[in-house]
Image (tube, rainbow, N blue to C red):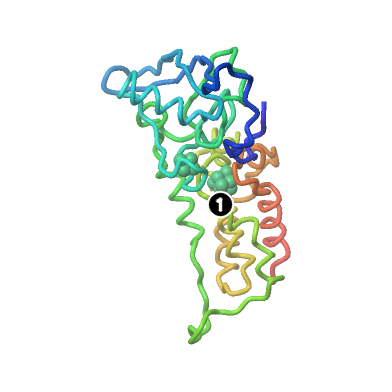
Amino acid sequence: MSTTTEAAEPASTVDLPESTGGGITTFDITLKVRRYIPEFSDEARWDEWTITMQGTDRVLDALHKVKWELDGSLSFRRSCAHGVCGSDAMRINGRNRLACKTLLKDLDTSQPITVEPIKGLPVEKDLIVDMEPFFQSYREIMPFMIANSPAPSAERYQSPEDRERFDDTTKCILCAACTSSCPVFWTDGQYFGPAAIVNAHRFIFDSRDDAGDMRLEVLNDKEGVWRCRTTFNCTDACPRGIEVTKAIQEVKTAILTRAA
Ligand code: SF4
Ligand code: FES
């Protein structure tokens, strides 16, 4: 099984099994989706479909096939379908991944492929969760530049070295795969969670920003960085390969070493 941090391979490099007659190679999978339809029941249930897919298909393609050809009521979020918008994080075979970046050929297709909503956020329908608690934490860390000096006539200059300091955390696409893989977040929904801390890191270490102390104070809260137990689930889950746990550790250190 592949890791979640690898980008989907371009179709031209995928090693397809031999096919006869020059046709496109296909195979059958069983897709098993945890469904919650509040109009019908308070209980979630599992539905499964056996469908024929192609070697370059991703889990998102399988979900589309079910929705478009078999059961139009199946509900999930997606937009870009190319690992950019962050809207299709879900638990695939028990691990948080983006459905659009998870190739079926990298999963064990001899077993049903399970798909569930991400954990720790209220499920609205099927694979759709209420992201409001996640974005509330995001808003609280003030994810925008706050500069005290007057706006220059051109851009605010920054050296390549200063830009490099926070490069990793600029890659976040707000998919929530990290926060919803965190055991602390599962048990304490008030915890800011890894994604909010990653996005605070992005501005705290930006040399052009002047509100780092304010963000550090927000995260010095009892529901802030000190709730992190360094389990590395977040780093493992991040589809952008961001060193999430390292960013959290750097914010902790910044709180401890900031000027009194
Ligand atoms: S840090 Fe990674 S896993 Fe977390 S929200 Fe950003 S992109 Fe998603
Ligand atoms: S649909 Fe946009 S990241 Fe997957």
Q: Residue at x 50, y 48 (%)?
A: 84
Q: Place residue 217 in its image quadrant.
A: bottom right
- Looking at the rendered structure, the secondary structure element under dot 1 is loop
Q: Residues within 10 Å of mark 1 (few under 14, many from 20)?
A: many
Nearer to me, 259 or 119 = 119
Evaluate whether residue 47 shows in this view.
Answer: yes
Q: Place residue 18 in its image quadrant.
A: top right
Nearer to me, 25 or 82 = 25
Q: Amino acid at mark 1?
A: Cys
Nearer to me, 92 or 221 = 92
Q: Is mark 1 within 8 Å of ligand 1?
A: yes
Residue 148 falls left or right of residue 167: left
Residue 259 falls left or right of residue 201: right
Q: Horizontal and vertical percent for residue 38? A: 30, 23
Q: Horizontal and vertical percent for residue 191? A: 54, 44
Q: Horizontal and vertical percent for residue 195? A: 56, 48
Task: List the residue tagged with mark 1.
Answer: 172
Q: Is residue 42 above or below residue 137?
A: above
Q: Is residue 8 above or below residue 72?
A: below
